[in-house]
């Protein structure tokens, strides 16, 4: 198989902590699916820690190593966001946001000290997280008449497709998740069911 539709992420939020020369680094890791979710968590942490001097972060989306965002938030360039992002790469997790909130302790740490602090805090949060394997998928909307129910359900059951929602009346609808590696097979099977309309869900 040339394409693997699995990836590693985290099951839920996790926290880590690191302290150096009085400065406290609080790391928060979250599973995220898009930019909007990441921004929402960032806003929450700004409200939770209004007196922190820095809210540095990085997140990855998808398998593409180019789909990422990071911020040093006032720290010297390359000392905060990049170490956080590099830790996400080295742990091979994606669809993950890590925010490290810093409370200044009065003593400058220098560039090596900052890089180590943000890296170590990030590692602590990821160590506390449950790493899970997930799948890339597309959501398809199926529309069919009641007599086609058995044929449709056979495809859903045999291909083990998670059902997001369904409505069974004379005109039936169903939304299912189809793993990326199964899309071609799914479409081929669906085309053989007369009267079944298949479309990508919005």
Image (cartoon, rainbow, N blue to C red):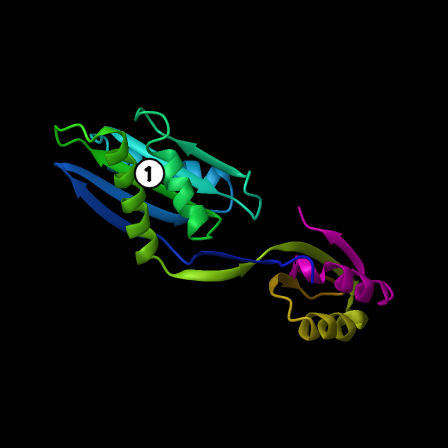
In the figure, is residue 14 to the left or right of 190? left
Residue 175 picture quarter: bottom right
Is residue 150 shown above or below 98?
below
Q: Residue at x 70, y 75 (%)?
A: 158
* Percent of width and height locating residue 74: 31, 24
Depth order, front residue of 118/112: 112
Answer few, some or many: residues within 10 Å of disc 1's Cα (few below 14, many 20 plus, some between 14 and 19): few
Q: Is residue 180 part of the magenta span, yes or no?
A: yes
Residue 83 picture quarter: top left
Say which quadrant the N terminus sits in: bottom right
Q: Residue at x 23, y 40 (%)?
A: 25
* Percent of width and height locating residue 39: 42, 36
Q: Name the residue under label 1.
A: 44
Residue 161 picture quarter: bottom right
* Percent of width and height locating residue 40: 41, 38
Is residue 139 shown above or below 57?
below
Q: Residue at x 64, y 63 (%)?
A: 166
Magenta-highlighted residues: 175-202
Depth order, front residue of 30/24: 24
Residue at far front of view: 112
Under circle 1, the secondary element is: helix
* Percent of width and height locating residue 173: 71, 60
**Residue 174 visible to an observer of this rendering:** no
**Residue 98 visible to an observer of this rendering:** yes
Is residue 6 shown above or below 60?
below
Q: Is residue 186 part of the magenta span, yes or no?
A: yes
């Amino acid at each position: 198989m040339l394409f693997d539709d699995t990836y590693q992420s985290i099951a839920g939020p996790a926290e880590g902590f690191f302290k150096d020369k009085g400065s406290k680094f609080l790391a928060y890791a979250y599973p995220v699916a898009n930019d909007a979710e990441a921004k929402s968590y960032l806003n929450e942490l700004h409200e939770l820690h209004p007196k922190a001097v820095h809210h540095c972060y990085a997140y990855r989306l998808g398998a593409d190593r180019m789909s990422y965002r990071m911020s040093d938030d006032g720290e010297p360039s390359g000392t905060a966001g990049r170490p956080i992002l590099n830790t996400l790469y080295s742990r091979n997790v994606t669809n993950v946001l890590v925010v490290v909130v810093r409370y200044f302790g009065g003593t400058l740490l220098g560039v090596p000290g900052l890089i180590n602090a943000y890296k170590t805090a990030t590692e602590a949060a990821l160590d506390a997280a449950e790493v899970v394997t997930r799948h890339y998928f597309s959501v398809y909307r199926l529309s069919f008449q009641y007599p086609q129910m058995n044929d449709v359900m056979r495809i859903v059951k045999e291909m083990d497709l998670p059902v997001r929602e369904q409505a069974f009346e004379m005109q039936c609808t169903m939304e299912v998740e189809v793993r990326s590696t199964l899309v071609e097979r799914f479409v081929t099977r669906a085309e053989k069911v007369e009267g079944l309309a298949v479309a990508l869900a919005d």
